[in-house]
Amino acid sequence: MNQPFLRFLQAVRGAGVRVSVSESIDAFKTLDLIGYGDRQLLKDSLGLVLAKTEEEKLRFAECFELYFTRKDFAGAPSAQERQAADHEASGDSETPLGRMLLSGDQAGLATAMEAAANAAQVSEISFFTQTNIYARRIMESMGLEPLEAEIRRLRALGTPEAEATADALDRGRTYLGQQVREFMERQLAVYAQGKSQALRDDFLQNTRLSNLDRRDFQRMKVIVRAMAKRLATRHARIKRTARRGQLDVRRMIRHNMHHDGMMFRTAWKKRKIERPRVVAICDVSGSVAAVAQFLLLFLYSLNEVLSDIRSFAFSSSLIEVSEILERQGIEDAIAQILKDIGFGSTNYGRALADFKAGWIDKVDNKTTVIIIGDARGNYTDPRLDIMKSLYERAKRVIWLNPEYQSSWGSGDSDMLRYRPFCHLAAVCNSVRHLERCLTALLED
Amino acid sequence: MNDITQQKFGSIETVIDGLATAGYICSRQIGTAVYLAQQLQKPVLVEGPAGVGKTELAKATASYFGLPLIRMQCYEGLDEAKALYEWKYGKQLLYTQILKDKLGESLRDSDSLPAALERLRSLDDVFFSEQFLEARPLLKALQQPAGAVLLVDEVDKADQEFEAFLLEILSDFQVTIPEIGTITAGVPPIVFLTSNNTRDLGDALKRRCLHLHIGFPDGGLEERIIAIKVPGVAASLRRQIVALVQQMRTLDMRKLPSVSETIDWARVLLLLHAERLESEMVQETLNVLLKYEEDIEAVRNKIPGLVLQATRDAGAV
């Protein structure tokens, strides 16, 4: 089996390109066909076989460059230069590693290092802290100990000639150390990138939104979008259910051709079930300032998943933001909404009243209403009457609260008073939670 | 695949040159994809913005190899009766009516019901044979004796169920018809699937295909394409046209002009006997390049600057 190429496939996977077994087989076939002769051609061909989206193609290209770049020992001084530099050190070394170092045998050193790296299972590396230990292992398996023993012995001899050889070997050892460490850093880039990213992503998905760092926002965006996309693909198909009682004559005749036109099997007309109609109302006031950005991120991803959604945002008064979310990029949209209406003092009653005045007729028995917020209304009138009418009109009312259930109802939180008018009230403060809520919504 | 076709697939260079003789100038990557598709016998999934020549690639491939092009346009609601096969109901009914007497006759001399049944069974598959099978594009592609180029156009427009249904054809080049059995292609067709990314295709489908992404061509390639498609345009004007379109693609627009629009525009300019770009003429013919009112409005006042820049770029080449 072609080990280096297998490891390349592993590295490609690590870089976030999905490579299935059948695609690996294709890659091997392609390799047989194309060969290693033309680098660009190999890259193009493997790119066709392995990377299946534009984004994957970029990642693949990056990984290919990293993996198939070999700069090891490029700067090793050639034999002549070395001899010119220490002309008195013409003494030969007894160890194979020492001989290679003294003669500046680049190819030999590189081969030995690759073999040693194989033996040390470098492809298992996951963290940068492991670089040194792997480098040490590689050097040991290349024959570091005999080399050090030889240097000690030469020093013990004490003759000027032996001293010179020992010096040369010493320099060689330092040089080797540098090269191996550089090699390991490249290996780390090739293999560990995917693993540590996966670890970080996992962490981000489970962390409370209010505890997230600002710097993680970039990555969060990627995760939330990936989630939105996943949900969208899963629910892209429009479900059809049988409309019992109405025959589809054309299809029935076709189905029953086997029976020479005898109608044994019935075929019924089917009804398409469209994706849910959603009204989403998001709190962006000061009390949820820490999570407002992420709440809007949720809203944005909702907008991407669902085709029929109207979105609203409020602090004290409420505005419709569907247009902004629809037309602008995620960052601009969030910035604009926060600028327009964000960080005010919360007034749930006012917001509900605004909604009632402008849009209550958009809510009917097919609509799902999602309210995202902490229900902390600064002791203002919560307008439970409007909430009740929403509850009665809508198919479902879902309240997603970023606070834990234990703090619902504490202080100015009206959550416990709103809860009777929700079909579902759930804690939603991490990406995991959000995905669960959305899935429940879409699978309904 | 016969020897001549085999020869035409000799190497990537021959494929690229061959496609050029069929009127399709392609980058090395596209050539590689066509070559690999034939060598590995895998379908090619072609993605990219509208009008960069995804469909054209299949046509050119067919014309270069002298194979029939079988095209299937996908749309929502496409089902196997339209894609794969359909029984010729009318003919079946007609034949049963005509042959009624004949059947009665042949059954008459069997004295018991089991015997008549036995009799019938020996005749059974008469009405469900290939004679009564109406082949639709997919089946037709498998039946071509010399192989074919099968183009499944805009596969993203079809339902997800249909995508699953394509899998058998794409991986094994065979289809199963319940009444007859499995039909395997004598010569596997070269399959192109195109997609505009209106929805994400399933992983199962992608796994079975080579994935080719065609983007907008660079200036040099686009000039060669124009040269071959609209031969009447003078070289200097051609350079200016391409330089202008390339600049436009860097602007922020709803729909960027693609190669097909460049070709159309070059044709228009040729009809108008243009010798070089002038801002007035460009403004008047802008609707050939840009397909949205808002794009046209956004670009209109930038035209003089763009034309100046394009003339300068073209001059410098």
Image (tube, coloured by chain):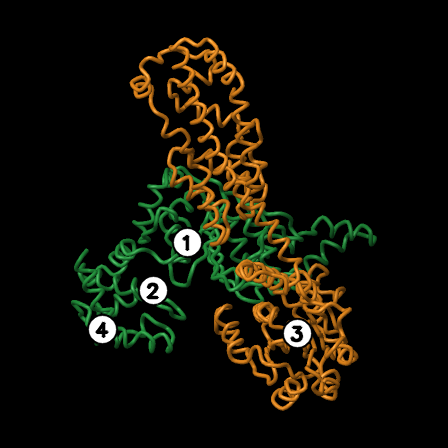
Chain colours: A orange, B green
Q: Are marks 1 and 4 in contact (CB under 8 Å)?
A: no
Image marks 2 and 4: residues in contact by CB distance under 8 Å:
no
Q: Which residue is mark 2?
A: B249
Q: CA distance from mark 1 to mark 3?
A: 50 Å
| Mark 4 Cα-neighbour bin, 10 Å: few <14, some 14–19, many ≥20 | some
**Camera-side mark, 4 or 3:** 3
Side (left or right) of B116 relative to A128: right
* Mark 1 or 3: the one toward you: 3
> Dot 1 corresponds to which residue?
B58
- Mark 3: which secondary structure? strand
* Quarter of the image where one finds residue A195: top right
Check if mark 2 and mark 1 are on a common chain: yes
Q: CA distance from mark 2 to mark 4?
A: 16 Å
Element under disc 1:
helix
Q: Label 1 amino acid? A: Ala
Determine whether label 1 and label 3 are within 8 Å by CB. no
Observer-nearest of A444 and B4:
A444
Residue A335: x %, y % from top left: 50, 72
- Measured Cα–Cα span from mark 1 to mark 4: 38 Å
Residue A31 horizontal/vertical position (percent): 46, 35
Chain identifier of the residue bearing label 4 in the image: B
Is A186 placed left or right of A348 in the picture? Answer: left
What's the distance in space between the residues labelled 2 and 3, CA to CA?
Answer: 40 Å
Inter-mark Cα distance, 2 to 1: 25 Å
- Tag 3, which chain? A
| Vertical comparison of A21 with A393: above or below | above
| Quarter containing the C terminus of chain B | bottom left
Give the label, 2 or 3, closer to the camera: 3
Whole-percent x, y for residue A24 in the image: 55, 40
> In which quadrant will I find the N terminus of chain B?
top left
Q: Which residue is mark 4?
A: B304
